[in-house]
Every structure is written in structure tokens, then in C-alpha cells.
């Protein structure tokens, strides 16, 4: 494992965290894909796997330096720092871009998924009947998930904890979008928009000397929801990493085949040409949740017409492919230097 001692290495790792955090927030895109393509996926999984009995013993006995080194703490802390920064910077910008330039943003991500598929398939040399079947199964699962109908929003804390455990899979399973799973569970807006924005507003208020936010029931509720969601995410992240570490060691080719299938199947989720279908009542009026948010029912995908917007979208798809292949080129050069 790399030591990340130089300023350059640290900044690059923070940038990778930024990319993972941004990808995790976009429905249909998996932060795990970033880790996979950028070449640090296995280090990420094995580092998380170090949060085991030995690691916890080091932590609870006060041997913090030994614990930090044991869990590859420099790598994880820099990576998660980038993710945290992304939620209050890049993710905010991305929210704006998706509203203003939805087609082009989805086109870039669609291209990045295609680039990821190209990257993974061309280097996979262990094709046989088993891996072909597993890849096909992964494709079917990915496509099947993309056509499920979203549920209604639910702020029950036990359900929020479950959402945290499930949604974090996007960081550890490339092609399995945690954000899209939250849409299917009905809690994407609650957990990744409302709760995060509430935390941002609380932080701004505290820096400006306004402590009345702690007497506001809405902010208290949102912070409680975000805390439970975070705890669920940590539990899911650590427990799933142990499982993935086990299967990667013993069934690496089959696991990679399933991941390739998931990534291929996720193309259906990020298809750029789609319209959001909102849930309506018998009178045809769009239904709202408890806070006045429009309830998403599904996405209507269509074949685009040939026009200037389609041409621009194709250019952005090519840009997305280029971004991933550039990451691969950079990763290969880094490995040669090491």
C-alpha cells in the first residue's frame, strides 16, 4: 500500500475522494466505479476490512497511533476528507448543473460508465462459462433495479438506519448506485438533499453566532435523521467490506465478473434521454410528500431526435469516456513509477 507522504500524493487522494463523494450523490452513478477505475478499489476494501476485532482493541485500549497505522488511516482519512468536501462544494455545484443542464450532465456520466465498461472488460482475462454467466446475471440485476418503481418517503429512524446500510453499497460495489437505491426506497431527497442542506445551514448559522437553530424542531429532526443515516452507513460500510474482502480473496474473478455486469446494467439508470414521472392522484395532480416535495414515481426513457442538443449530448458522452480513459492512463503511469 502506498504511503501518501508527499503533498502531491495527498492532494491527488483528496481529489479521488471528491470524485467518489460526487459520484455517490448522483443517482445511477457509483462511487465504487471511481475507486475501481482509479486503481485504489482493493486498497479501499482491505483498509475498511481492518476495522475488525484487532483494530477495535487497539482503539479502545488507547493505542491510537497503532490503530491509525493498522487501518491504513492516512489513506482513509484523506479519501473521506475529499468525500466530505464534495458534499458541501462539488455536490452543491452538481445539484445546480443537473437542474440547469440535466441532459448534458447525464451524458457525461453515461460516457463515464461506458468508459468504465471498456476499461474493465479489456483487462479481464479470465473468461469461462462461469464468469460469462455471472456477468450476464449482473447485467440483468442492474437493468432490473433500474426499472423498479420508487417507494414513498419514510423518516422512521429504523428505516433511515436501513437506508444508510443499503445506500453505502455504492461505495463498495462498482455499478451499484447507492443514490439510486435511495430513490427506490423513497428517501433520496430526505437524506441526500434536505438533511445535508440542513446540516450546511446549521453550520453557517453557528459560524454567524446564531444558536437558535438548536431550538428549531425542523433542524433538530434533520440532524437526528442525518446522524442515524451516517451511523447506518458506517455499519454497512464496515460489514460489507469484510464480506467483499473475503470474496475478493477467494473468488476474485467471479466477483469482478459480477461487478462488470452491474456496471453494464447501470447504463439503463443513467440513460441521458429520460423524463421524470411524478406520482399523481386520480385528478391528475402531482402528489407531494409531507414537506411539499414532488414524489418521483419513475423515469420515462426515450430515443432522442436528431438535433443540436443530441449532438452536444453525444459530445459530452465522448467527454465522459475520455475522462475515464485518462484516469486509466494516469493510473498506469503511476504504477510504472512505483
Image: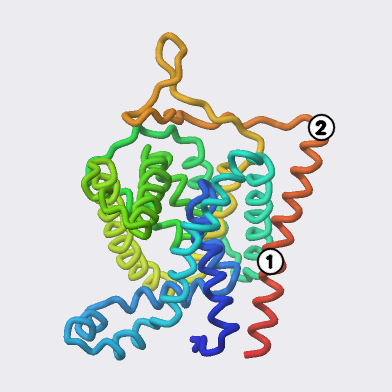
Which mark sits nearer the N-terminus, 2 or 1?
Answer: 1
| Residue at 55% in and 69% down | 16
Question: Foreground: 33 or 218?
Answer: 218
231 sits left or right of 39 in the view: left
Depth-wise, is mark 2 or mark 1 nearer the camera? 2
Q: Which residue is most to the left? A: 61
| Residue at 31% in and 53% down | 210
- Residue 77, located in which quarter of the rendered image? bottom left
Q: Position of residue 53 (x, y in %)?
A: 22, 79
Residue, disc 1:
122
| Residue at 40% in and 21% down | 287
Seen in the picture, residue 5 relative to 261 is either above or below; the reply is below
Residue 203 seen in render: yes
- Label 2 neighbour load within 10 Å: few <14, some 14-19, many 20+: few
- Label 1 neighbour load within 10 Å: few <14, some 14-19, many 20+: few
Seen in the picture, residue 290 relative to 174 is either above or below; the reply is above
- Residues at discs 2 and 1 in contact (Cβ within 8 Å): no
Label 1: which secondary element: helix
Display coloring = rainbow
Residue, disc 2:
306
| Residue at 51% in and 40% down | 146
Amino acid at each position: 500500500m502506498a504511503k501518501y507522504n508527499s503533498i502531491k500524493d495527498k492532494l491527488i487522494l483528496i481529489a479521488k475522494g471528491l470524485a467518489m463523494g460526487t459520484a455517490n450523490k448522483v443517482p445511477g452513478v457509483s462511487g465504487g466505479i471511481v475507486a475501481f477505475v482509479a486503481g485504489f478499489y482493493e486498497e479501499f476494501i482491505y483498509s475498511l476490512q481492518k476495522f475488525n476485532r484487532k483494530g477495535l482493541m487497539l482503539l479502545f485500549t488507547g493505542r491510537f497511533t497503532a490503530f491509525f497505522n493498522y487501518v491504513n488511516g492516512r489513506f482513509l482519512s484523506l479519501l473521506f476528507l475529499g468525500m466530505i468536501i464534495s458534499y458541501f462544494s462539488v455536490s452543491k455545484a452538481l445539484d445546480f448543473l443537473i437542474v440547469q443542464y440535466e441532459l448534458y450532465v447525464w451524458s457525461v456520466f453515461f460516457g463515464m460508465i461506458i468508459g468504465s465498461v471498456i476499461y474493465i472488460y479489456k483487462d479481464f482475462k479470465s473468461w469461462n462459462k462461469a464468469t460469462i454467466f455471472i456477468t450476464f446475471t449482473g447485467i440483468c440485476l442492474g437493468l432490473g433495479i433500474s426499472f423498479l418503481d420508487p417507494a414513498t418517503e419514510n423518516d422512521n429512524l429504523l428505516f433511515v438506519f436501513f437506508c444508510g446500510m443499503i445506500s453505502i453499497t455504492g461505495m463498495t460495489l462498482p455499478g451499484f448506485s447507492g443514490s439510486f437505491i435511495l430513490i427506490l426506497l423513497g428517501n433520496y431527497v430526505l437524506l441526500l438533499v434536505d438533511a445535508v442542506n440542513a446540516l450546511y445551514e446549521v453550520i453557517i448559522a453557528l459560524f454567524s453566532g446564531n444558536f437558535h437553530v438548536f431550538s428549531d424542531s425542523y433542524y433538530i429532526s434533520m440532524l437526528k435523521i442525518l446522524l442515524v443515516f451516517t451511523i447506518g452507513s458506517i455499519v454497512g460500510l464496515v460489514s460489507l467490506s469484510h464480506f467483499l474482502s473475503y470474496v475478493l480473496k477467494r473468488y476474485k474473478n467471479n466477483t469482478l465478473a459480477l461487478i462488470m455486469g452491474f456496471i453494464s446494467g447501470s447504463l439503463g439508470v443513467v440513460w441521458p434521454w429520460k423524463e421524470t414521472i411524478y406520482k399523481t392522484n386520480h385528478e391528475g395532480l402531482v402528489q407531494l410528500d409531507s414537506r411539499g416535495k414532488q414524489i418521483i414515481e419513475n423515469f420515462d426513457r426515450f430515443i432522442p431526435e436528431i438535433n443540436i442538443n443530441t449532438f452536444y449530448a453525444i459530445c459530452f458522452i465522448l467527454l465522459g469516456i475520455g475522462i475515464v480513459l485518462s484516469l486509466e492512463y494516469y493510473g498506469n503511469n503511476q504504477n510504472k513509477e512505483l
